[in-house]
Image (cartoon, grey):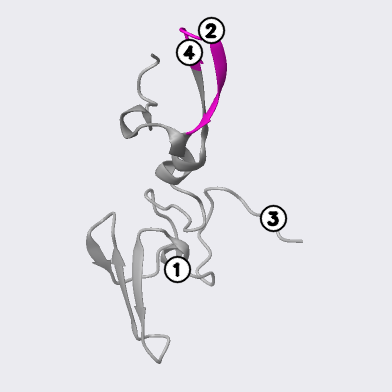
Amino acid sequence: MRIKVQGGTARYDEPSLCQSCRFAKIAQGPRSCDQIVQCGQLEAPVTFKVVSCSEYIHHQHPSLWHMEDIAWVLRTDAKRRAIGFVRAKDLKLADRHVLDDDE
């Protein structure tokens, strides 16, 4: 039975986090040692296997922009006294992605 301890000793037999990170640009050669990794967050080449990174985001997780793009927005219309959901795609660009203010 394998127990995973959060924040414990890193396992060096596992692949680098860069292999599944959204910000990594990886060029792989014919041999396993022929690899160039460029980090988009650090804006620097990575020359070692990464086991922990504070900027890591899995490449399969949607970004905030993608989640806002498919979201339904609840709007009220004072003139018609109506409340309803509107697709974010159907809103004017100025009305989209308004998350910072509680208007």
| In the image, farthest residue toward the front | 80
- Residue with the mark numbered 1: 19
Q: Are marks 4 and 2 in contact (CB under 8 Å)?
A: yes
- The location of residue 43, given as percent across then percent down, is 22, 59
Magenta part of the protein: which range? 76-87
Q: Amino acid at mark 1?
A: Gln
The secondary structure type at the circle numbered 1 is helix
**Label ID, residue 3:** 3
- Residue with the mark numbered 4: 77
Judge whether residue 80 is colored magenta: yes
- The location of residue 12, given as percent across then percent down, is 50, 69
Please give the name of the residue rendered at 41% of the width and 58% of the height, measured from the top-left corner: 22
Please give the name of the residue rendered at 36% of the width and 27% of the height, measured from the top-left corner: 95
The secondary structure type at the circle numbered 3 is loop
Please give the name of the residue rendered at 55% of the width and 12% of the height, measured from the top-left corner: 82
Gap between marks 3 and 2 measured at Cα: 57 Å
- The location of residue 38, given as percent across then percent down, is 28, 67
- Residue with the mark numbered 2: 81
Graded by Cα atoms within 10 Å as few (under 14), some (14 to 19) or many (20 or more), the crowding at tag 2 reads few
Q: Please tell me which of labels 1 and 4 falls first in the chain.
A: 1
Gap between marks 1 and 3 measured at Cα: 23 Å
Please give the name of the residue rendered at 41% of the width and 91% of the height, measured from the top-left corner: 31
**Magenta segment main secondary structure:** strand
Gap between marks 1 and 4 measured at Cα: 47 Å
Gap between marks 4 and 3 measured at Cα: 54 Å
**Left or right placement of residue 27 versus residue 12 in this view:** left
Gap between marks 2 and 1 measured at Cα: 52 Å
- The location of residue 24, given as percent across then percent down, is 36, 64
Q: Please tell me which of labels 4 and 3 falls first in the chain.
A: 3
